[in-house]
């Protein structure tokens, strides 16, 4: 910064690179293991359903009930984070969910399966919306779509590495010490969550002012940019006023469609690949890396383009429509393996890019306590789609013996989300 108070662009760019380099790697790593613990049930399903005699309906309901626990505790969790700080609260969340995730190796009955999935949702509630809130403490809205997209590359990265690793664990450790491969999967993949939870408690800073690795001029710059960004919205918007804002509920609907698509893809991708004629859990795991790699690239490309062009709603609608068309096509491809994998790749490119594009919308109109409650409300209500999606797809698969009907339902929901996204006034959210 200069003596006149003007900000040197080179200094500002260097400061934001420093913040990004300090925060994003640990946040991405945390979300990577979080997401892996949430969706590794999709790989475990390939073995545990036959071992335990579970139906598709049991699996779908169990996969989805996670989001009921998530829904119940998400808003309180985010408000607590805003009050006590991200460092301790995010660390607590990670340690708790790691312990619950490891306990899945002892599942024997549908009731145990449902109970642990519900508890996992309770344990993890608040992590994802907490990070979205945490990013608003550091980055103004003009930089946030890129940062959110960068953070959310953890989802496809978890698929790129998690799929092959999950397949390898299940194949390599099957029968070791009398435990099945899916039991080892839950145990081994729970350990990183607990370890990282401890690391977060010692590493993460609650905000700009408490960051000892920043100089005073850097802190002043960051605080100034966040304050300038907040001046364009009502920073003192009450929680009641936030809940009465129709835009918030429209955003719930949009993100609901994103969640239906995301979990329709991630919970059933191993099954879709298996249906396409691929045999063996290791090969299935290796092939899941291809769609997730495309998702990682599309997240970054579309996030950067949305920030540069300031057409976030249009980018979001495009991603949702691409995901809808390609997902339906993948289900219709049948045993044409190359065609099915190609369609899944396009579906992942659209569906996985949609969520980070979406989060630039509500964070453009909310601040303070209203932001903490608003982000959590949108995420918790919309993530009921994570309950509905696998439950409906599982039931339809039992009824029809095919995944086509379920994927068509998911695709229709994605199209609905695109229509609603385009209907929202863009004066604030596209700025």
Image (cartoon, rainbow, N blue to C red):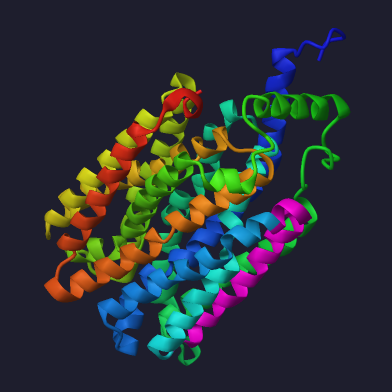
Q: Residue at x 32, y 62 (%)?
A: 389
Query: In the rendering, at what x and y percent does residue 348 appear?
Result: 33, 47
Does 88 appear in magenta?
yes
Q: Main secondary structure of the magenta part?
A: helix
> Please, which residue is most extreme toward the top here?
4
Q: Position of residue 247 (x, y in %)?
A: 45, 39
183, above or below 168, in the image: below
- Tell whether 149 sits left or right of 131: left
Q: Is residue 425 visible?
A: yes
Does residue 168 appear to the left or right of 223 in the view shown?
left
Instruction: Report if residue 190 lies within the magenta region.
Output: no
Q: Is 264 in front, or is 280? A: 264
Give the answer, above or below, for where 259 lies relative to 102.
Answer: above
Q: Nearer the viewer, residue 285 or 72?
A: 72
Q: Residue at x 53, y 53 (%)?
A: 377
**Span of residues in magenta:** 80-107
The answer to which image quadrant residue 305 occupies is: top left
Instruction: Identify the image quadrant of residue 53.
Output: bottom left
State the image coordinates of residue 191 (x, y, percent, origin top left).
61, 71
Quadrant location, the N terminus: top right
């Amino acid at each position: 910064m200069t003596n006149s108070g003007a900000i040197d662009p080179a200094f500002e760019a260097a400061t934001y690179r420093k913040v990004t380099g300090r925060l994003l790697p640990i946040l991405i790593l945390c979300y990577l293991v979080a997401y892996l613990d949430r969706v590794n049930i999709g790989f475990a399903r390939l073995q545990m359903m036959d071992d335990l005699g579970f139906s598709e309906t049991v699996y779908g309901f169990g996969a989805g009930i996670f989001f009921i626990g998530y829904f119940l505790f998400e808003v309180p969790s985010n408000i607590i984070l805003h009050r006590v700080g991200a460092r301790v609260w995010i660390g607590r969340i990670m340690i708790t969910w790691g312990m619950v995730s490891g306990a899945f190796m002892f599942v024997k009955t549908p009731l145990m399966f449902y109970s642990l999935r519900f508890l996992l949702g309770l344990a993890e509630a608040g992590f994802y919306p907490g990070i979205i809130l945490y990013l608003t403490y550091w980055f103004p809205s003009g930089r946030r779509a890129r940062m959110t997209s960068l953070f959310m590359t953890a989802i496809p990265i978890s698929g790129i590495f998690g799929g092959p690793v999950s397949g390898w664990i299940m194949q390599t450790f099957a029968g070791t010490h009398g435990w099945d491969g899916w039991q080892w999967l839950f145990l081994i993949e729970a350990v990183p969550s607990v370890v990282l939870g401890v690391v977060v408690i010692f590493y993460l800073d609650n905000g700009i002012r408490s960051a000892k690795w920043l100089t005073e001029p850097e802190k002043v710059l960051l605080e100034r940019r966040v304050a300038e960004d907040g001046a364009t919205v009502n920073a003192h918007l009450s929680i009641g006023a936030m809940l009465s804002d129709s835009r918030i509920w429209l955003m719930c609907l949009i993100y609901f469609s994103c969640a239906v698509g995301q979990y329709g893809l991630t919970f059933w991708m191993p099954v879709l690949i298996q249906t396409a004629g691929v045999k063996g859990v290791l090969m299935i795991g290796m092939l899941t890396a291809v769609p997730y790699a495309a998702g990682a690239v599309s997240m970054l490309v579309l996030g950067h383009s949305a920030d540069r062009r300031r057409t976030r709603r249009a980018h979001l609608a495009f991603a949702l429509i691409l995901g809808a068309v390609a997902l339906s096509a993948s289900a219709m491809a049948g045993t044409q393996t190359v065609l099915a994998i190609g369609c899944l790749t396009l579906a992942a490119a659209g569906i996985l890019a949609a969520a980070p594009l979406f989060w630039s919308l509500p964070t453009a109109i909310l601040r303070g306590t209203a932001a903490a409650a608003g982000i959590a409300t949108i995420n918790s209500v919309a993530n009921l789609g994570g309950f509905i999606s696998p439950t409906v797809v599982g039931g339809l698969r039992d009824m029809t013996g095919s995944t086509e009907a379920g994927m068509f339902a998911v695709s229709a929901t994605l199209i609905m989300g695109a229509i609603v996204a385009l209907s929202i006034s863009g004066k604030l959210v596209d700025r």
